[in-house]
Image: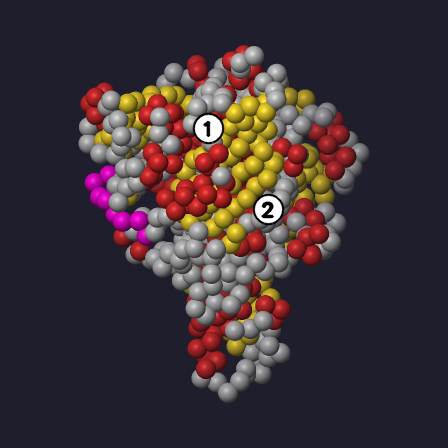
Amino acid sequence: MTSNDQIASKNGPGFQQIGQPLDRIDGRAKVTGAARYGYEHIVSDKCAFGYILGASIGRGRIVAIDAQAATKSPGVLLVMTHKNAPAQARFGEPTTATPREVFTRPRPVLGDAHIRYFDQPIALVVGETFEAARAAAGSIDVRYERLQGDFEPELCAATYRPERTNAGFATDTSAGGFAKAFAQAPVKVDATYTTAFESHNPMEPHAAIAQWEGDRVTIYTGTQTLANVRACVAGTLQIPLDSVRVVSPFIGGGFGSKLIAHADIMLAALAARVLQRPVKVAMTRQQMFANAGHRPLSIQQVRLGADRDGKLIAIGHEVCSSTARFEEFTEQTGVFTRSLYAADHRVTRHRLMRLDTNRGEWMRAPGEAPGMLAVESAMDELAHALQLDPIELRIRNEPNLDGTSLDPDRGIPFSSRNLIECMRRGARLFGWERRSARPGAIREGRKLIGHGMAAAIRPNYIGPSRARVVLEPRGTLRVQLDMTDIGTGTYTILTQIAADVMQMPPASIKVELGDSQLPTTAGSGGSWGAASAGSAVHDACTKLKRQLLDLPGIPPGGLQAEGSVTRSAEYDRYSQHAFGAHFAEVAVDLDTAEIRVRRMLGAFAAGRILNPKTARSQIVGGMIWGIGAALMEQTLLDPLHGAFINHDLAEYHIPVNADVGQIDTVFIEEVDERANVFGSKGIGELGICGAGAAVANAVFNATGIRVREFPITLEKLLPFLPG
Ligand code: MOS
C-alpha cells in the first residue's frame, strides 16, 4: 500500500499538539512485546489454565455428562459443568428494549442443561497446563437430547417486530405516503440485497485471567469498556460492584466484539473462586466464531422512486435480520436511511427472524455497514437507470434537514454536513472523470476495468465520562481514566489533548488507562471514544490549570483535578453525523472472474481531526473491511447442525495485504462546534460505511453484472461474464 494522503485539517486557535500526526505513544511497547495483553499478565500466584468444551449440537439439552475420566486425568484441577458450577444470576428476558442493559446484564455460564447454540460452553476443564486441560476435555462424555433448530434463514418464515433497534432507535418510521408515491414514480429501483453473517476477528482472541483476594476479584482481560465487564461480572456473580476490578491496559482489537463480557471472563472468575487460585481462560480462534459475537445476516429490500431528473420521491428500506432465539439483537440496518437523502415519501422498517445461534453483537458500524451495502448499491442502480452520474444523483437529493433520524415528525438541522464536498474533492483526487458511464467499456487485455463510488454517513455520539489529572511536583502530568486503547490511538490523542490544555510537552504527560479503579468513561465503542474521553481530559486539565493560576507554583504534594463530560443539548437540537465518499477501481478477470481492488480513495468530513496519522489508520482499516464485506467475508451456518463451519482464518476470508491496492484518504477541513470542545466527530466506524458499496458499484461498472447477494464471490459473477 502506498499513500499520498492530504491532510487538510488545520490547527485551531490554541491547539499546538491536537491536529499533529504524533506517533503512537504505545508503539514501542507494542512492537517490543512490553505491552501486556489480557492473557499475558503476571499475577502473584501460579495461574491454572482453563479449556472450554463446547456443545456439539445446536439446540437441545444435556441428558448426561460424564466427567469422571477428565477429573482423574493427570494435571487436572477442576472440571466444571452445569452440575457443579456455582450459582449465578438468572439470564433475563430476551429483549433489546432497554439499550443500556444489554451491555451489563448478567450472563451466566454453565447455568443449566439447555443448549442454545452450537459450541456453547458446556464444561470448563482447569489444569496445571493448557495441554492437560485440553486433553482431559476430550475425554468428557456427553449425551444430548436434540431438538430441531432453526438454522436456515429461508425456512425462517415467522418474522417479528422488535420493540426498538439496537441503540434505542425506532423500529419503523414512515413519512408521506410511500406506497402510492413509489407506485407512481416514473423511474424506480426495487431490489433485494442480502448480506452474510460476518465474524469479528481481532488479533487478540478473547481471554481473561481472574484472581480472587478474599471476596474481591480482579479480571485481567481485553475489553473495550471496563464498566460493562465490571457490571456484568458483579451482576452475574451477585457480588457488589466494588468487589470487581477490571484491568485492561492494552487490547488487541475489538471491533465491537469486546463491548460485553463473554464466557471466557465468567468461566475464569467462577473457576478461580472455586480453586482459590488464579485461572486464565482463552477462547481458541475457532471458538470465537460461535462465542464472541457476529454480525447478523440481513435481507434488505430497497425501493427508490425518482422523477426523470433524478429527484427522489420515495425511499423505502425494509430489513429483516437474524437474531438469537434466547437473546435479541436488532442491528439498526435501516436507521441511517432516515438521514441520508431527501424524499417526501419514505419508510424504514426492521424485522427479525429467530435462529438458534448465539446472539448477534455490535460489529464495526452496526447497521450502517450492511445497510449501506444495499442502499448505496441501489443508488448506483438508480443512477444507471436514469443515465445520470452517481455523484450528481446524490447532489440532487441532498436534504436541508434530517427528517427522521430520531423522531419521524420532526426535522432538525445537521450540525454540519459536507457530503457534497467529500464527493467533489474525492472525485477530483480519484480521477472520477476517467470512469466510463457505460459498464464493461474499459478493457485491458483480459481484464475489465470499473470504477464505483458510494456515500458514507455515520452518527456522532458522546458518552458520559470522567477523568483525573495529577500534576506531580517534578512536573509530570498523570492523566487517569478507565478508558481503553483498542488499537485506535487513545493513549496518543489524550497525550496531545493534555499537552495542549496544560501547554506542556507531550513527553511530560503520562496517560494511564484500562483500570476500573480510575474514573469511569464510556470506553471505546460507537466511535464515541475520542470525543468522550478527550472531553473529560480537557475538562480536568482546564480545572487544574485554573487552580495553578491561583498558586505560586506546584505544591510539594502535587495538585489534582477531576473533569467530566455528558451529552449536551446540541445532540437533541442537531443531527450529528460524519460524512464521506468512497471511490474504488477494480479489475475483473474475464476468464476467472477474479476481482482485484486496484485502488480506493476516501474523502471524509468528520470535524476536526485530532491526529491525522491515527485517524488515517482507522479509516484505512475500515475501507479494507469494506473490501472484505463486498468480496470475501461470510460465516457459513451449517443448516443441519447449526455450526459456523468456516470457523478459522484459513476459511473465513478477509483481505490480506496482497488483496489491497493503493488506498488514499483525505479529510475535508471542518470543525463542528456543536459536537464537542474540539469540534471533532467520531471516525472509528466511518471508514467502513459505504466502502463495500463503492467496490460493488465498481464491479458493476466493470462488468455490467449486478450481484445483490454479498459477498460478491467469483461463482456469482463467472457465469455471466462476456467471452
Ligand atoms: Mo463498535 S461495533 O461500537 O465497538
Closer to the camera in the image, 600 or 108: 600
Which amino acid does the dot numbered 1 rest on?
Ser
Q: Is residue 561 visible in this depiction of the protein? A: no
Residue 215 appears at what percent x and percent y? 58, 53
Residue 248 appears at what percent x and percent y? 60, 52
Closer to the camera in the image, 292 or 673: 673
Closer to the camera in the image, 585 or 714: 585
Q: Residue at x 43, y 55 (%)?
A: 669
Relative to 327, residue 483 above or below: below
Residue stretch rendered in magenta on the structure = 407-415
Residue 468 appears at what percent x and percent y? 50, 67
Q: Residue at x 48, y 34 (%)?
A: 434
Disc 1 target residue: 436
State the quadrant of the N terminus.
top right
Q: Is residue 166 visible in this depiction of the protein? A: yes
Which amino acid does the dot numbered 2 rest on?
Ser
Q: Residue 338 carries which label?
A: none
Residue 630 appears at what percent x and percent y? 51, 29
Please tell me in which quadrant of the rendered image residue 373 appears. top left
Q: Which residue is drawn at 30% across and 40% down?
A: 398
Secondary structure beneath dot 1 equals: loop
Please tell me in which quadrant of the rendered image residue 447 appears. top right
